Each structure stands twice: as C-alpha cells, then as structure tokens.
C-alpha cells in the first residue's frame, strides 16, 4: 500500500507520461476540488432520503384524498 495520497500519485503519473510540473500541479489541484467517494456517498444518501420523504408524503396525500372521496360519496 502506498503512503502517497491519491492526488500525489496522480501528479506522479502525469509527470511520468511527460507533463510539466506546472501542468501536473494544475491537474492535481483541479482533481482535488472534486468530491471524494465519501462526500459523494453522503450527497447521494441525502438526495435519496429527500426523494423517499417526498414519495411517502405523496402516497399519504393520495390515500387521504381517496379515503375522503370514498367517505364523501357514501
């Protein structure tokens, strides 16, 4: 297992394929701005939780309206 962080490994790979130090630094800095696996998973969990809450609320409203209509018709 490497001691280097993924960003340093990316920089090293870019240098090995012929990028200048400035280009490798710029690319590594740009990649560092993207969310990591954990941050992305947290964002996805939050989105799914929000959608689940909306769907449950919508089902409750639809069932409530259906019951109200049935009660009103009788």
Image: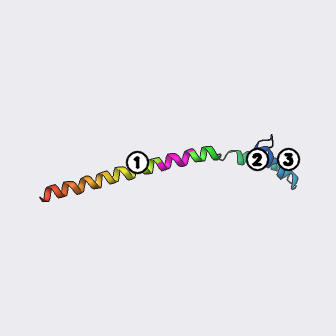
As helix, strand or loop, the secondary structure at mark 1 comes to: helix
Q: CA distance from mark 1 to mark 3?
A: 48 Å
Q: Position of residue 12 (x, y in %)?
A: 84, 48
Identify the residue at image location x=71%, y=45%: 32
Residue picked out by circle 3:
21
Q: Position of residue 30 (x, y in %)?
A: 71, 48
Q: Give the quadrant of residue 72.
A: bottom left
Q: Position of residue 35 (x, y in %)?
A: 64, 46
Horizontally, residue 1 falls left or right of residue 59, namely right
* Among numbered discs 1 and 3, the one appearing first in the sequence: 3
Q: Nearer the viewer, residue 11 or 41?
A: 41
Mark 1 or 3, closer to the camera: 1
* Among numbered discs 2 and 3, the one appearing first in the sequence: 3
Graded by Cα atoms within 10 Å as few (under 14), some (14 to 19) or many (20 or more), the crowding at tag 2 reads some
Q: CA distance from mark 1 to mark 2?
A: 38 Å
Q: Is residue 49 magenta?
A: no
Q: Nearer the viewer, residue 52 or 22?
A: 52
Mark 1 or 2, closer to the camera: 1
Identify the residue at image location x=27%, y=54%: 63
Graded by Cα atoms within 10 Å as few (under 14), some (14 to 19) or many (20 or more), the crowding at tag 3 reads few
Identify the residue at image location x=46%, y=47%: 49
Main secondary structure along the magenta-highlighted residues: helix
Q: CA distance from mark 2 to mark 3?
A: 10 Å
CB within 8 Å, label 1 to label 2: no
The residue range painted magenta reads: 42-48
Q: Nearer the viewer, residue 58 or 21?
A: 58
Farthest residue, direction left: 74
Horizontally, residue 42 falls left or right of residue 59, namely right
Residue picked out by circle 2:
28
As helix, strand or loop, the secondary structure at mark 2 comes to: helix
Identify the residue at image location x=81%, y=47%: 11
Horizontally, residue 21 falls left or right of residue 69, namely right
């Amino acid at each position: 297992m490497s001691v280097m962080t993924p960003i340093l490994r990316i920089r090293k790979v870019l240098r090995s394929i012929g990028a200048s130090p400035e280009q490798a630094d710029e690319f590594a800095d740009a990649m560092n701005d993207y969310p990591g696996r954990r941050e992305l998973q947290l964002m996805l969990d939050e989105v799914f939780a929000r959608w689940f809450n909306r769907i449950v609320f919508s089902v409750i409203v639809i069932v409530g309206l259906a019951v109200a209509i049935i009660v009103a018709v009788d």
